[in-house]
């Protein structure tokens, strides 16, 4: 994964700072300069939301994610639902039908059992709704003060239907860029809960399973070339990563990007850019231009999808990939965040 130049090198004598985990340029550099070389993985293939494994005659998608959100419960969800849906969504972004999850819990001494039961129960309901089984798990307890109640790591496997290949390498000049709904609700809901901010109207997380929408796209004869759920780092980070991985230019019409009034107002008060704020139930889809209208019809039928829109298109890149956003004021070149706009949001 190549990112733009970063002023803070991943130096041997350095230490991990919070921005290192932040869906920004530093995360990309940690992956490219530390993890991939240590694991002997070539960085030549574009990275996606999950790995693809050939098993017998089938292809499995395999992915993992860790969840450290604070607070543990927030308007629209909790860390357990997030841990299920976050991983199921990454499988869906590979076009996979989710099969099974693992769940690893790190629990802090002093955590109320009633709270753990509540979170585990909502996790179970989210898994059942997504049609996926929590098939294996692990629990560790750490001393008081050495954790924040609960950290959860989930991994997931899913079956990729025959003939389906979805990823940055499939993006083509001419593709339409679709956004599945309005931006920023998850990040703002977490921020408001954490800081005790009472926005009117209240903003709940957009936390939602994207697998049904992906399955319906495929069933409607629209196989997206690439999908990406807009989690930490938001729309802007996802587009910058895909443009770099695919080696294309993305031209986005800023006026077409849906942001509800409540989120727009909250972002103004907090000094945040909604394009970089996290979502947990939104994705971008790159589809062949002739499939754009049909794909939008499908996306708009799903929860949160009423404002799904075509927000731009793909053109051949003159050099390395980049993202240009046309605004009233001119054209803006999007970049990865050099730090983290909102920490601990997933
Ligand atoms: Mg993802």
Image (cartoon, rainbow, N blue to C red):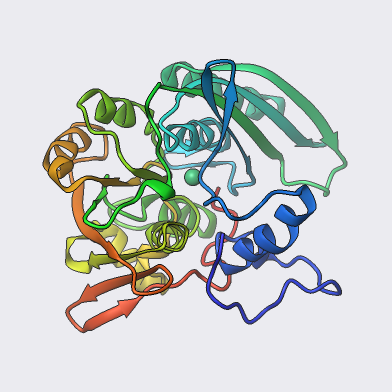
Indicate left or right for 170 with 136 as reference: left
Nearer to the camera, 170 or 119? 170
Above-or-below relation of 170 to 273: above
Residue shown at the point (66%, 27%) measured from the top left: 103
Residue shown at the point (70%, 53%) measured from the top left: 36
Res. 142 in view: yes
Instruction: Point out residue 164 in the picture as x, y percentages from the top left corner.
Output: 38, 29
Residue shown at the point (26%, 39%) measured from the top left: 304
Instruction: Point out residue 115 in the picture as x, y percentages from the top left corner.
Output: 64, 29
Residue 19 is drawn in which quadrant? bottom right
Instruction: Point out residue 203 in the picture as x, y percentages from the top left corner.
Output: 34, 50
- Give the tally of numbered discs: 0
Which image quadrant: the N terminus? bottom right
Above-or-below relation of 306 to 97: below
Nearer to the camera, 75 or 137? 137
Residue 222 is drawn in which quadrant? top left
Indicate left or right for 274 with 66 as reference: left
Nearer to the camera, 299 or 70? 299
Above-or-below relation of 3 to 148: below
Res. 205 in view: no
Instruction: Point out residue 330 in the picture as x, y percentages from the top left corner.
Output: 22, 83
């Amino acid at each position: 994964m190549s990112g733009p130049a970063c002023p803070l090198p991943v130096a041997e004598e350095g230490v991990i700072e919070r921005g290192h985990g932040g869906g920004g340029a530093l995360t990309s550099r940690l992956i490219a300069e530390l993890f991939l070389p240590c694991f002997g993985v070539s960085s030549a293939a574009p990275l996606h939301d999950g790995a693809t494994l050939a098993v017998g005659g089938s292809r499995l998608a395999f992915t993992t994610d860790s969840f450290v959100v604070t607070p543990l419960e927030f308007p629209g969800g909790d860390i357990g639902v997030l841990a299920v849906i976050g991983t199921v969504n990454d499988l869906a972004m590979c076009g996979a039908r989710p099969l099974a999850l693992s769940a690893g819990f790190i629990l802090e001494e002093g955590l109320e059992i009633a709270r753990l039961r509540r979170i585990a129960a909502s996790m179970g309901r989210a898994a059942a709704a997504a049609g996926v089984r929590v098939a294996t798990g692990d629990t560790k307890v750490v001393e008081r003060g050495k954790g924040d109640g609960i950290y959860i790591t989930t991994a997931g496997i899913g079956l990729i239907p025959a003939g389906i290949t979805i990823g940055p390498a499939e993006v083509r000049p001419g593709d339409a860029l679709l956004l599945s709904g309005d931006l920023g609700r998850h990040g703002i809901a977490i921020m408001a809960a954490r800081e005790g901010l009472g926005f009117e109207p209240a903003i709940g997380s957009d936390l939602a399973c994207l697998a049904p929408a992906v399955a319906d796209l495929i069933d409607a004869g629209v196989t997206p070339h690439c999908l990406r759920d807009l989690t930490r780092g938001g729309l802007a980070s996802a587009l910058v990563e895909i443009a770099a991985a695919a080696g294309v230019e993305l031209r986005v019409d800023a006026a077409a990007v849906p942001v509800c009034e409540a989120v727009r107002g909250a972002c103004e008060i907090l000094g945040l850019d909604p394009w970089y704020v996290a979502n947990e139930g939104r994705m971008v889809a790159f589809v062949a231009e002739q499939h754009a209208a049909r794909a939008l019809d499908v996306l708009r039928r799903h929860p949160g999808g009423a404002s799904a829109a075509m927000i731009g298109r793909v053109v051949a890149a003159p050099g390395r990939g980049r993202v240009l956003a046309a605004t009233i004021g001119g054209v803006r070149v999007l970049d990865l965040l050099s730090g983290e706009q909102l920490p601990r949001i997933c």
